[in-house]
Image (cartoon, helix red, strand yellow):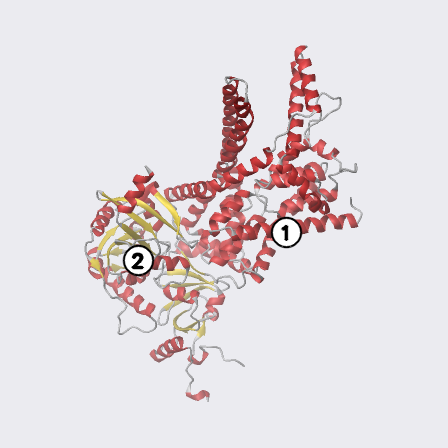
Amino acid sequence: MTATINSTALAAPLIALVGNPNAGKTTLFNALTGLRAKTANHPGTTVEYRTGLALAGTSPVEIVDLPGLYSLEAASAEERLARDILHGEAVGMRRPRAIILLMDATNLERSLGLASQVLELDLPIVVALNMMDAAARDGIKIDMAQLEAELGCHVVPITARTGEGVGDLRMAIAEAARGAKRVSRPTAICDSCMGCAFSARYEWAERVGANVSVNPRPTTPEFTDHLDGVLTHPVAGLVAIVAVMFGLLALIFWGAQFPMNMIDWLFGKLAVGADAGLQAVAHGLPNGMLQRLLQDDVRSLVVRGLIGGVGGVLVFLPQIGLLFFALALLEDTGYLARASFVMDRLMSKAGLPGKAFVPLLSAHACAIPAIMSTRVIEDWRDRLVTILIAPFMSCSARIPVYTLVVGGLLLPHNPMLAALVMASAYGVGASAGLLGAVLLRRTILPGATQPLVMELPRYRRPSLRTALWTALDRMRLFIRKAGTVILVFSLALWVLAEYPKTSASPEVQSLQSRAATLQTNGQSAPADALLTEAHRLHEREALAYSFAGRVGHFVEPVLAPLGFNWQIGLGIVTSLVAREVIVSTLVVVYGAGDPSAPGASTSLVDNLRRATRADGSPLFTVATCLSLLIFYVLALQCTSTIAVVRRETGGWKWPIVQFVGMSAAAYLASLVVFQTLRAFGVS
Amino acid sequence: MSIEPGSELGLTRLDHVPVRACGMVGFLSAADDEVVRLKAMGVCVGRRIEVIQQGDPLIIRAFGSRIGVSIRVARHVFLDLCGHAYSHETTVAGDTAARTGVLPIRPDQD
């Protein structure tokens, strides 16, 4: 099937979709290609473009959606790519057979500015005159025949949001793809024009606009004036941002909970089912190596490695989908441009562009979609700084760690103070991120942020379909590009935590034989409890004996100055998969004691409170807890984030820089906290 | 005391233009990417723009669109305000200065 699509794509004529930003290009692209689109990176760059197969008449064409442009004078990497594709100079890309030039009927003259350059490319061109519904509402009347005469090509009126006129456009594309009339018409020759070449083009645009339309340049609607008075106001605009972003965060944070829990539940069920199935198969085999292999290694690989790994990838999808759906809606309404506008001045003080605000706020839910959403930042260095500091924001995966350390160990009886400490953890993370941005700007990524030059588009009703397709596209991209790396990481860590194997210790064997005795006496409940305890103890011993456990022992001298013993070191190693894994590791390492013993507790927190160092002194003191807290606030303990950064930056260099930098910051901060507290007598 | 570029031409820097005032772009004193983008958006010599909101960033209206512009970029844009006697010579001189980087000197400045 894939081969068929690929061969069709190669055979289909390539058609470039060109237009100004905010002209409705994505909406038209989605309307033409549906879900057959794919997102790709241009080789050797981080510039992204989308291609998709569409039916034009009865034949397929491949449409490439170029970045939004105001001109073909390349100022940014995106504009350079668009120009190179149109001129047939882009590496690994055919020259387009024809062009769909998307124009905005509500702002014809601006669209004509770009058109003046596109018309000189000597290619067949179809003009899609979009937003005809809005133009009609604004009282704009356009003489199509006159416009066609002025431009020398076919003009199709459409409303991409509703799909009106898209059928006619497909027919016109088919005609253009057959190599119909090429357009090559110099437009910037204007003897009477003053100023630069752009001025000449805009003079031409004004003349054409005046010839073909009535009321071609309406004043901005009053509605926009009034709303902008609030939304771009330095104070009221900030209040609006706080309100909107709180809603966005709540959507990602809480809205994603149910589907995430569903995925978790589904994979839990799948793991149980696979476990039972493999056990049944193993029981059906004769005793021997194959049976042991199936019962032990294969079962663990399938249940913990594969199902756990795939579940660990898919569990992020609801947050990614919801974030991109909401961002697409906000962008479509025109609000996102206003939010970036208001935040620009504040963010630039930390060496960040205004557009970094939304990704950084989203990172408080999850760094992965946040890093993916930095694509709204045009300047590569600005985007890179944002990517590098985004994981400093306290994401939802840190909550179990914060809750355990602050609520469980540090301040179990003072919820008010515990809430304050947790809020401080969020503040420390955000401050560290901003400080990180300042440091990056003064060291490896020097220079000021790109100054803001951004169109504030008209407010309009967003397209749900476009938002949905954007979300689906991002989810698909995450699975394809980052999911595979995350799965490999998960499997590698499974190997580290699983091998080498150890046999049951005398203590485990003793528990098992006591359980067998109880079972024989008909006391099945205490027998089950003992078997559970035997299982936990064996897991603990196996983990300590594994490569991961050995790494924990190996790094103990390095972590000792932070107040951590080898068990915490092991938790840090295993939580490289995801931060919250330290909690499950501690469950195994400091798991419940013998539940049948009098006064025994099965609470992890109780066991952690009772945990001691080798010299018998308490382990989780105030100093250790605060040191562990600050470590998890600052450390990049998330392989999924590393995988996404690798994808977004196009290599391993920046994820390594980020991992080393954040780990060093976490280590130093923990060291300072622990040693300072100790110096002041706080144990 | 340094003479602000453009002041010789009787032009006003964009970030000094009052709200709701309009003017003809007379001179752009830089040629970096952001200024190129501004030109592509219609803020180029000889074009008329209007200031909607002052501050950093400020908002202008050019060619039917609202454009947010950082003050760092606005400092490179000089306008011949509406209401001033707009002279063809001013724009031509500004355009020449933009191309050559050399500001014309008025005869009475010597």
- Name the residue at 71% across, 34% down: A608
Residue A511 at x, y percent in the picture? 69, 21
Q: What's the residue type where badge 1 is placed?
A: Ala
- Cα–Cα gap, marks 1 and 2: 46 Å
Query: Which residue reaches farthest top?
Result: A521
- Name the residue at 28% across, 50% down: A14
Residue tagged by mark 2?
A: A88
SS class, disc 2: loop
Front in this rendered view, residue A511 or A96: A511
Total label count? 2
Q: Which mark is residue A664?
A: 1
Instruction: Judge from the rendering whether residue A83 lies leftward or rightward of residue A44; answer left or right.
Output: left
Residue B109 at x, y percent in the picture? 46, 87
Q: Badge 2 local density, few (<14 within 10 Å), some, or many (20+)?
A: some
Q: What's the residue type where badge 2 is placed?
A: Gly
One can see residue A661 in this view: yes
Q: Chain of mark 2?
A: A
Residue A216 at x, y percent in the picture? 29, 60
If the image is split into quadrants, where does the C terminus of chain A sit? Answer: top right
